Amino acid sequence: MKIKKILETALTLALVFQLTACENEQVEEIEEETVSNFKEITAMELVSEIKVGWNLGNTLDSRGTSGLSAERSWGNPTTSPEMIAEVKNAGFNAIRIPTTWEFHIGEGPDYIIDADWLGRVNEIVDYAVANDMYIILNTHHDEWYFPTYETEKEDTEQLVAIWKQIAERFKDYDEHLIFEGLNEPRLRGTQNEWTSGTDESRDVINNWMAAFVETVRSSGGNNDKRFLMLTPYCASSNPEAYKALILPENDKNIIVSIHAYTPHSMCLADGGRGNFLSSVEGAVRDIDKLFTGLKETFVDNGIPVIIGETGARNKDNLGNRVIWADYFFSKSAECGIPAFWWDNGAFSTGEAFGMLDRHLVNWRFPDIVKAIMTAIENKAPLYTGITDVSELTLS
């Protein structure tokens, strides 16, 4: 009897061990499947799949308020799945989610991100995932950093701490999720703020970009191959700034991040000229120069570029904005440099780049949206023959 019991016990233990081993193998297979679900393509191939993008501006990137109410503190309503679905339905297959972390983190050296805030960011990312969109997630209006040698070490520590947490949270997401290290790193409040910077500031920003890449790459999951956007001084479209950007030599999953409100007097300047006709050589000169420079410097050398912000603010000049969008986005498509409209939800005052009425979930300027979608499809402007905006038929 004792021998029989011993044999029964041994068989039971063997069976338990076998079942446990099988369960462990299944868990490992599930985990491996989760982190390996990442399309093996080049950065150039990935960017070629991004047709046109839209910014969820003045929302998660607000400043001065902590807690979840910060999402609404700059006047936009709580982001809903219906809003993001409408953006996708309109033809935008990518979304940039500008996010400010500064008012949602603890003290150093850990700089722990508030769990509720990180969770809310994750929810909105998942709205875009549900719509099969490409997503850019960044650090946006954070002002804890200043690109000088004096503050570089402390700022780098905070940059690394924040990105460790973001990278950990999203490490198992596939190639649709792109990380952008910094938005417009610059010498805020100085005479060089909106220039191409200084040798020192450009050097510090390059060091930050390297720290960002190293942090994400070493964070596990899919992050060893995640596509990362690196930003020159101020995300400037000035060649002096972007040609100073140092890219990692042995990392092919890198994208250059540029902002371009071009021409400035039409698109961004207070007052300024609100007229634009692509039939006028001088009007298109800056746009042509922008895309030629980026293409020759990066794209022709196998380095993809995304224009993360662009747009033409409302100056009661709808026809001119339609013609501008037609020309700008056709050049974007022609050169393989996708552009993202900066939509801050403002329609008539200040920097009025609003397109989607998020309260009603419809488009305030459908003619501009239509012009953008037609332009990226045709890869050639339609309105170069128009010599007077009154010739344009609007809905």
Image (spheres, rainbow, N blue to C red):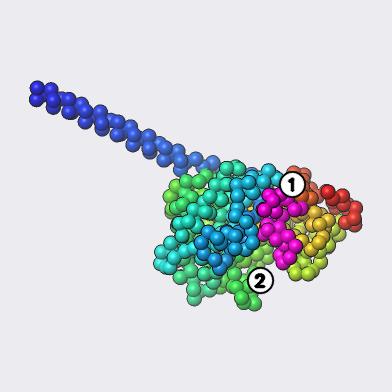
Which quadrant of the figure has residue 75?
bottom right
Q: State the SS at label 1.
A: helix
Query: What's the magenta region?
Result: 340-365
Q: Position of residue 48 (x, y in %)?
A: 65, 46
Which quadrant of the figure has residue 70?
bottom right
Position of residue 368 in the picture relative to residue 119 (left or right): right
Residue visible at 67% across and 59% down? 344
Residue visible at 58% across and 53% down? 136
Q: Position of residue 229 (x, y in %)?
A: 57, 56
Q: Position of residue 302 (x, y in %)?
A: 62, 50
Which residue is at the front of the view, 344 or 92?
344
Residue under numbered circle 2: 195
Which quadrant of the figure has residue 271?
bottom right
Residue 193 can be seen in this image: yes
Residue visible at 77% across and 67% down? 265
Query: What amino acid type is highlighted by mark number 1?
Result: Met
Q: Can you say whether 171 is above or below 321 in the image? A: above
Marks 1 and 2, Cα distance to the nearest angstrom?
A: 32 Å
Q: State the SS at label 2.
A: loop
**What mark, if any, has residue 389 been given in the picture?**
none
Residue 302 can be seen in this image: no
